[in-house]
Image (tube, grey):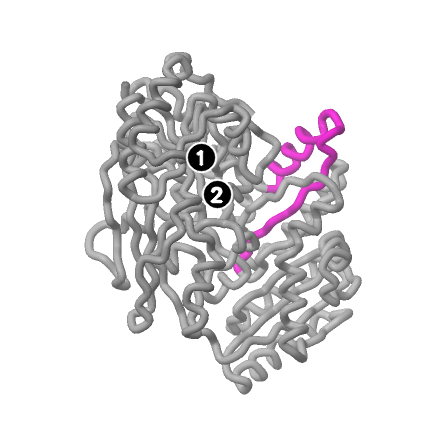
């Protein structure tokens, strides 16, 4: 993977840049020791690494603004970083960049139960947002598998979803407002505690922009009342294609579960050995959860189970207790970690129409055989957000390159099936060069023109999202 060469003038001015940053931040908030900056050389896409010039850890919007004013004046690239859980290389630094981490910005600034919102600093973890309101029987809906660690800043950057996004939507559906610092240090507030705002939908523009437009420091999030109850059902099938067809039929029937999760045999076995969730040994597993009053749950599960029986499931088992439900979800939330016991893997993120699930799953199996690498599938089936896991051996020469080539074919398949390159992981560096497969040159030019407005020197999160040959020269042209 190509990355732009570092600017030698920035490397030569490192001491000066670090000194200026140290003047506006408290002691310990600037890191430039090469031994310590190595901690930030990659995110969860560990195949690519590059130590940054320096790392800054501000604690407030004002400190972020001060940092960006200096970097703007010095023309130093800045890589915003949440918790570093990005699976697409979204926080991969360049050698001449400053990592701006928001890990110290974790405060709860305001909670309003009457109007159902919470305002937090953007470094707060996803799960701890719910933790701040759960005593009042409220919760924050988006729930990525990394919710214990991932930061709201990263959720906004990548428009993250999670298992329950089928009913509640992804981050953009639960984001009401934000505070963002532009590259020149200007502070802007977009949206607020209200449900809608006049003018252009700048909130929708920023959510999912992958740190290309500004650094989000605060977020106003929608919180919801906890449902009266919830219950999952396990469905086992003898093929991935049959499970995919069952998902399609459930959606077609008009019933709206809170979640429909899919796992295939490699994931089932790895997860069961890891979490002991009580999963059956079958080719494909669905976890379908509904919520509401006991009567509503019974009615919804009755319809869902009737649909499932039409596909001859080898297992059909409703949860009978809160403990069993917790084990079922522990297994699903542990799937990525459990698969890591089998070896190295690349986790993809493509989205397809639900009706295309049977065809796409079959084709992924064919591509797996053709490339000679195992692929495990675990994903949010209800909204077609797929997460194929390509297993490879990082110590075997050529295996990484083969896995990346297979991943590119799978993502192209998602686009050709009527879907897109990413559902919640973002483009980052992983899918940057595949953007041409989904977007025409004019489409890319319009997107890059938006970045020109917010970040005319192209200093924010360099070498991400846009193909290098399409964006090459933009930073130099602005200078």
Answer few, some or many: residues within 10 Å of disc 1's Cα (few below 14, many 20 plus, some between 14 and 19): many
Q: Is residue 474 visible?
A: no
Q: Which residue is mark 1?
A: 465
Up/down of 450 relative to 265, above or below: above
Viewer-proximal residue, 209 or 53?
Answer: 53
**What residue appears at the point 66 percent right and 50 percent down from the top-left corner?**
337
Whichever of callouts 2 and 1 sits on the residue coming sooner in the sequence is: 2
Spatial CA span between label 2 and label 1: 8 Å
From this viewpoint, which residue is outermost toward the left?
198
**What residue appears at the point 55 percent right and 66 percent down from the top-left corner?**
259
From this viewpoint, which residue is outermost toward the right?
281
Q: How many marks?
A: 2
Viewer-proximal residue, 339 or 303?
Answer: 339
In which quadrant will I find the C terminus? top left
Q: Are marks 2 and 1 in contact (CB under 8 Å)?
A: yes
Up/down of 5 relative to 375, above or below: above
Answer few, some or many: residues within 10 Å of disc 2's Cα (few below 14, many 20 plus, some between 14 and 19): many
Residue 151 horizontal side relative to residue 331, left or right: left
Q: Which residue is mark 2?
A: 426
| SS under mark 1 | loop
Q: Magenta part of the protein: which range?
A: 383-410
Residue 198 horizontal side relative to residue 250, left or right: left
State the image coordinates of residue 255 (x, y, percent, origin top left).
Answer: 52, 74
**What residue appears at the point 57 percent right and 40 percent down from the top-left corner?**
44
Residue 261 horizontal side relative to residue 213, left or right: right
Q: Is residue 131 visible?
A: yes
State the image coordinates of residue 347 (x, y, percent, origin top left).
Answer: 61, 44
Viewer-proximal residue, 478 or 102?
Answer: 102
From this viewpoint, which residue is outermost toward the bottom?
295
Up/down of 275 relative to 475, above or below: below
State the image coordinates of residue 13 (x, y, percent, origin top left).
Answer: 37, 15
């Amino acid at each position: 993977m190509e990355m732009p060469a570092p600017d030698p003038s920035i490397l030569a001015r490192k001491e000066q840049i670090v000194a200026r940053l140290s003047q506006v931040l408290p002691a310990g908030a600037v890191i430039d020791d090469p031994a310590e900056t190595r901690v930030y050389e990659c995110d969860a896409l560990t195949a690519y690494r590059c130590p940054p010039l320096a790392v800054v850890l501000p604690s407030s919007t004002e400190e972020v603004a001060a940092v960006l004013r200096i970097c703007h004046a010095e023309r130093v690239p800045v890589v915003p970083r949440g918790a570093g859980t990005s699976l697409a290389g979204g926080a991969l630094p360049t050698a001449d960049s400053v990592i701006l981490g928001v890990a110290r910005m974790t405060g709860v600034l305001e909670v309003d139960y009457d109007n159902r919102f919470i305002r937090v600093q953007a470094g707060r973890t996803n799960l701890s947002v719910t933790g701040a309101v759960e005593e009042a029987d409220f919760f924050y809906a988006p729930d990525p598998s990394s919710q214990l660690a991932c930061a709201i800043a990263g959720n906004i950057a990548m428009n993250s979803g999670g298992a329950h996004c089928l009913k509640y939507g992804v981050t953009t559906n639960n984001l009401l407002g934000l505070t963002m610092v532009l590259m020149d240090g200007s502070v802007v507030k977009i949206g607020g505690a209200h449900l809608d705002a006049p003018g252009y939908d700048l909130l929708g523009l920023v959510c999912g922009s992958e740190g290309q437009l500004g650094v989000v420091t605060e977020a106003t999030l929608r919180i919801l009342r906890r449902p009266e109850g919830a219950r999952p059902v396990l469905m086992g099938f003898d093929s991935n294609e049959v499970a995919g067809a069952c998902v399609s039929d459930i959606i077609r029937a008009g019933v709206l579960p809170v979640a429909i999760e899919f796992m295939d045999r490699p994931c089932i076995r790895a997860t069961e050995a890891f979490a002991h969730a009580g999963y059956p040994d079958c080719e494909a597993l669905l976890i379908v959860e509904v919520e509401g009053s006991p009567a509503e749950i019974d009615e919804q599960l009755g319809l869902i189970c009737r649909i499932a029986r039409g596909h001859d499931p080898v297992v059909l088992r409703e949860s009978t207790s809160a403990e069993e439900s917790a084990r079922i979800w522990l297994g699903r939330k542990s799937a990525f970690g459990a698969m890591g016991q089998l070896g190295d893997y690349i986790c993809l993120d493509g989205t397809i129409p639900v009706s295309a699930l049977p065809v796409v799953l079959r084709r992924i199996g064919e591509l797996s055989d053709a490339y000679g690498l195992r692929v495990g599938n675990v994903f949010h089936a209800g909204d077609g957000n797929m997460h194929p896991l390509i297993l490879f051996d990082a110590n075997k020469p050529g295996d990484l390159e083969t896995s990346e080539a297979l991943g590119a074919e799978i993502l192209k398949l998602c686009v050709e099936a009527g879907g897109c390159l990413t559902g919640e992981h973002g483009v980052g560096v992983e899918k940057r060069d595949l953007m041409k497969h989904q977007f025409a040159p004019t489409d890319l030019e319009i997107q890059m023109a938006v970045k020109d407005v917010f970040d005319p020197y192209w200093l924010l999160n360099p070498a991400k999202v846009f193909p290098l040959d399409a964006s090459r020269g933009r930073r130099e042209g602005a200078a």
